[in-house]
Amino acid sequence: MTVLFSVEAQANEKIYQYQKPDGSVVFSNVKPKTQSVVQTLKFDCYACTLDSSIDWHKTPLYLGKYENDIIKASRRFSVKPALIQAVIHAESSFKPLVISKVGAQGLMQLMPQTAKELGVVKPFNVTQNINGGTQYLAKLLKAFDGDISLATAAYNSGSSNVKKYGGVPPFAETQAYVKRVKILHKRYYVASL
């Protein structure tokens, strides 16, 4: 399958996905006139929705999904696989081609500038996205002395906000995200035993 990206996503844009007659899949910020739209890809962070009806203690885990890439990134950047899995689950629910309403891309929802700084050229490439996201997570863990709550808060809302507030920022979305990542992290860890 060929995947073409016609334009880079900008904040608050809708991204349309459709299949051309030759079988290639197109992602565009322009609604196609002649093609039937398969899906509109614009969403909020999976674990950030405040009114989520998901039971985070029981939602199915994605055990084994992208396992080789996760293990390699874990070893390369010294981040536990369960934490990588938890962040992927929280960010994108393991969907590699998603774009958030603010422009974050792929499995670990990398912002274009962050991806560029991490050397991620193709943010929708599973391996590159996992490596970039894990590298970023390792950097945050180091900056916050291994404190997973602070590192994941920074992953969600930025290091500057964690430093400004001296802990998890008082943003409802970030607080929900940190709690849900913690639940998922524990569940992925227990499942790996």
Image (tube, rainbow, N blue to C red):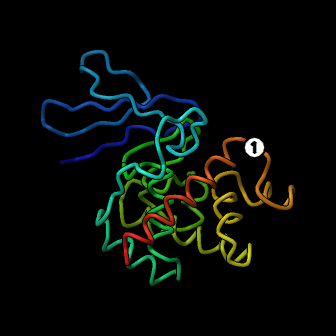
Q: List x then y, in percent, for residue 46.
A: 49, 43
In the image, 149: left or right of 88?
right
115 lies above or below 7: below
Report the number of numbered marks: 1
11 or 143: which is nearer to us? 143
Q: Quadrant of residue 41?
A: top left
Q: Quadrant of residue 172?
A: top right
Q: Which residue appears at 55% of the width and 72% of the height? A: 135
Q: Which residue is mark 1?
A: 171
Q: Which residue appears at 41% of the width and 50% of the height? A: 58
Which residue reaches farthest left?
A: 22
Q: List x then y, in percent, for residue 148.
A: 64, 69
Residue type, label 1: Phe
What SS does tag 1 mark? loop
Which residue reaches farthest top?
A: 33
Q: Which residue appears at 69% of the width and 59% of the height? A: 154
Query: Where is the C terminus found, in terms of image quarters?
Result: bottom left
94 or 128: which is nearer to us? 94
193 or 75: which is nearer to us? 193
Q: List x then y, in percent, for residue 106.
A: 43, 51
Using a 10 Å C-alpha cutoff, classify the residue at mark 1 as few (fewer than 14 neighbours), some (14 to 19) or many (20 or more). few
Q: Quadrant of residue 118?
A: bottom right
In the image, 191: left or right of 132?
left
7 lies above or below 72: above
40 lies above or below 160: above
Q: Which residue appears at 44% of the width and 29% of the height? A: 29
3 or 146: which is nearer to us? 146
Q: List x then y, in percent, for residue 37.
A: 29, 23
In the image, 24: left or right of 92?
left
